[in-house]
């Protein structure tokens, strides 16, 4: 990305068009209003963990360049629920989005800027021309370099206007809880709640309303220490250790401290918080784990927990069969185990590819696993949110199976046989003592019930405000539902048999479709960061993986960034209208171009695309994707 280059025609940025604006104090913005500022468009959707990572990545950049850079979030929804303006307003508050947001429910601005993936970032210079277009996360260092160049260039030309931007913060929500995430029953009968919006834990009396105490200062941070001084950042999952384990390790509860990318331990007697695993830095492909001299090294799959970079751990659950805490690592679509006894982490399942692939656990694909619960039979049930799926893991057999769910872009609210049932971005799950499984069907605002004995899915309750966690009451007759967007806990009765059946229809995410010929050339163009070049000292420096339901040839993983792909029209049903999703993952390693340096600084760029394509005879015979370093 070179903002000063004039070797290609300059492209004028399209106008920002949508349903309305948030975080502007009611003001409608145009690109003309932003002339003289460097503008960064962030195309996001609030279900997407990678989008949430980018929001956090940009905080430092926005603070550093507050007088020259204006970030505009363009919210382009994937799920039906995300197109609800009230849900979007809640998400903007929930995730502390500190810049203006354009509500783009019809994907009008998304299409105008040819976005293909969440998140996508577009950099616009002070004169209104596009100077950078990149997908994925981890681009902040390169954006900072580009902003510095743009500041120097446009300040010299007199086209840069310093000063405050158009951001107007919303009125904060008041109350005891703010966007609570999960809840845990304590041995005393009290409830421990992950009060994510207040960056703390709250202990409530059994009524779910009366405050007993708080753990955490309430300020975003990652300090260990006493209950009133320790700090967390949007904690989610909670897990109570068996008493004998807790006595051995000196803490009782494991907390998924999501935005800090940490696991934390809490001693219930004192309220003391300690860090158990993670470095506080997000895992990024190619980034080394921290190893101090004389310490045991850590790999990407196993090692001392304090030396491994995590990525948005979302939930935790104790597995007696694994003799460890199972961790749902939403940020890179994997499952891990944490052994409190020796403090080690190990990858349990997932490849870091996003999708819905069952079978051998280490080769399975997950998509933002967000809820865990262990059944009486030892099965680990999980809510796989981005595939709107209910799945379970057989730990001894190292297998995973999907019970409900069809893929990344299919969702809805439909009861009946599990194979046809549909969910919408579930975040919580609870295994009942009788073998049934309750699901917090978050974006449908419902609690669902799966009965393995009948293979049926039914609906227990509707009209809930983004239920994100479930807790089985002691008597098993009720579920405690964490209504995150209503900032409260709600009790829902559990029926003895099947609940009522609901059919709200099926939905499929309809992003702009790219037409391709049955046989076409897929080409990924890699642009190294300024001053770097491809690193081929130790072999091939690039990798390309391709998959699709209708793939005839050109699938799998190879080292070339260009290949011939063949998609079979005959393998697509009439209802598909020649459509399928082409999943592409590209990686490229680059290092400083100065050949005189013995150990140059290196960087591994990686990007996943899920591209809706329509196969048509006579369609385009080339599909080009851009990978930025």
Image (cartoon, helix red, strand yellow):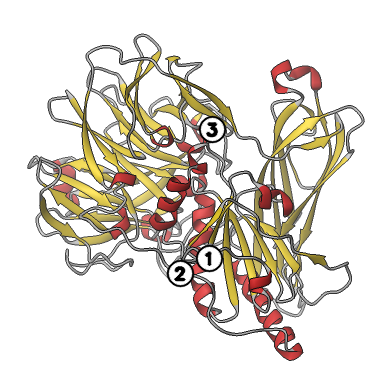
Q: How many marks can you see? A: 3
Looking at this view, name the residue that lies furthest to the left. 188
In this view, the residue in front, 369 or 40, is: 40
Question: Is disc 2 surrounded by few (<14), some (14 to 19) or many (20+) residues within 10 Å?
Answer: some
Mark 2 or 3 closer to N-term?
Answer: 2
Q: Secondary structure at mark 2?
A: loop
Q: Where is residue 100 drawn, in percent x and y?
A: 52, 64
Looking at this view, name the residue that lies furthest to the top. 454
Question: Which one is in front in this view, the residue at disc 3 or the one at disc 1?
Answer: 1
- Would residue 477 appear left or right of 9 to someone viewing this image? left
- Would residue 304 appear left or right of 527 to someone viewing this image? left
Q: Taking the image as drawn, is residue 623 in sight?
A: yes
Q: Are dots 2 and 3 in contact, CB under 8 Å?
A: no
Mark 2 or 1 closer to N-term?
Answer: 1
* x 33%, y 67%: residue: 221
Identify the residue position indicated by label 2 in the image: 168
Identify the residue position indicated by label 3 in the image: 364
Q: Is residue 153 above or below residue 29?
A: below
Q: Where is residue 21 drawn, in percent x and y?
A: 53, 58
In this view, the residue in front, 425 or 245, is: 425
**Marking on residue 95:** none
Q: Is residue 585 above or below residue 219?
A: above
Identify the residue position indicated by label 1 in the image: 27
Q: Where is residue 80 drawn, in percent x and y?
A: 52, 36
Q: CA distance from mark 3 to mark 1?
A: 47 Å
Q: Where is residue 1 drawn, in percent x and y?
A: 74, 68
Question: Which one is in front in this view, the residue at disc 2 or the one at disc 3?
Answer: 2
Q: CA distance from mark 2 to mark 1?
A: 9 Å
């Amino acid at each position: 990305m070179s903002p000063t280059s004039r070797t290609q025609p300059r492209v004028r940025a399209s106008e920002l068009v949508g349903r309305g604006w948030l975080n502007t104090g009611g003001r409608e913005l145009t690109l003309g209003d932003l002339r003289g500022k460097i503008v960064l468009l962030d195309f996001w959707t609030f279900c997407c963990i990678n989008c949430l990572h980018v929001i956090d990545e940009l905080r430092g950049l926005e603070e550093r360049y507050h007088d020259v850079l204006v970030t505009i979030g363009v919210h382009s929804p994937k799920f039906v629920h995300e197109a609800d303006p009230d849900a979007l307003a809640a998400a903007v508050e929930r995730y502390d989005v500190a810049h203006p947001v354009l509500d783009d429910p019809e994907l009008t601005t998304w299409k105008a800027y040819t976005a293909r993936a969440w998140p996508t970032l577009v950099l616009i210079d002070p004169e209104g021309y596009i100077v950078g277009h990149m997908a994925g996360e981890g681009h902040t260092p390169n954006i900072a370099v580009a902003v510095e160049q743009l500041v120097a260039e446009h300040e010299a030309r007199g086209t840069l206007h310093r000063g405050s931007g158009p951001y107007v913060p919303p009125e904060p929500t008041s109350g005891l809880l703010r966007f609570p995430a999960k809840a845990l029953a304590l041995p005393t009968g009290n409830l421990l709640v992950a009060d994510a919006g207040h960056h703390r834990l709250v202990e409530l009396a059994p009524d779910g309303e009366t405050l007993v105490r708080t753990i955490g200062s309430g300020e975003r941070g990652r300090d260990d220490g006493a209950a009133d001084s320790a700090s967390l950042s949007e904690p989610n999952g909670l897990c109570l250790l068996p008493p004998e384990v807790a006595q051995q390790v000196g803490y009782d509860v494991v907390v998924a401290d999501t935005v800090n990318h940490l696991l934390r331990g809490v001693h219930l007697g004192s309220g003391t918080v300690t860090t158990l695993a993670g470095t506080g830095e997000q895992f990024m492909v190619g980034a080394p784990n921290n190893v101090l001299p004389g310490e045991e090294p850590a790999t990407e799959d196993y090692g001392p927990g304090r030396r491994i970079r995590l990525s948005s751990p979302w939930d935790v659950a104790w597995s007696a069969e694994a003799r460890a805490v199972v961790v749902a690592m939403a940020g890179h679509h994997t499952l891990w185990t944490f052994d409190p006894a020796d403090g080690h982490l190990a990858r349990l399942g997932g490849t870091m590819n996003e999708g819905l692939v069952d079978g051998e656990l280490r080769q399975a694909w997950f998509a933002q696993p967000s809820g865990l619960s262990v059944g009486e039979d030892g099965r680990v049930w999980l809510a796989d949110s981005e595939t709107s799926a209910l799945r379970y893991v057989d730990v001894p057999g190292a297998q995973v199976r999907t019970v409900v769910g069809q893929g990344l872009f299919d969702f809805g609210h439909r009861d009946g046989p599990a194979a046809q049932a549909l969910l919408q971005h579930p975040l919580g799950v609870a295994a009942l003592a009788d073998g049934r499984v309750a699901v917090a069907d978050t974006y449908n605002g419902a609690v669902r019930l799966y009965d393995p004995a009948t293979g049926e899915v039914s609906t227990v309750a509707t009209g809930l405000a983004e239920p994100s966690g479930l807790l089985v009451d002691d008597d098993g007759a009720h579920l405690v539902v964490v209504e995150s967007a209503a900032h409260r806990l709600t009790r829902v009765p559990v029926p003895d048999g099947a609940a009522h059946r609901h059919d709200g229809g099926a939905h499929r995410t309809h992003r702009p479709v790219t037409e391709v010929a049955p046989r076409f050339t897929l080409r990924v163009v890699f642009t190294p960061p300024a001053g770097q070049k491809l690193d081929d000292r130790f072999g091939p420096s690039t990798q390309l993986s391709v998959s699709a339901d209708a793939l005839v040839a050109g699938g799998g993983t190879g080292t070339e960034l260009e290949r011939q792909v063949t998609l079979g029209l005959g393998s697509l049903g009439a209802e598909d209208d020649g459509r399928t999703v082409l999943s592409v993952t590209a990686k490229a390693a680059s290092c400083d171009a100065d050949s005189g340096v013995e150990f140059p600084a290196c960087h591994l760029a990686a990007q996943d695309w899920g591209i809706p394509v329509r196969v048509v005879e006579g369609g385009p015979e080339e599909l080009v994707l851009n990978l930025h370093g």
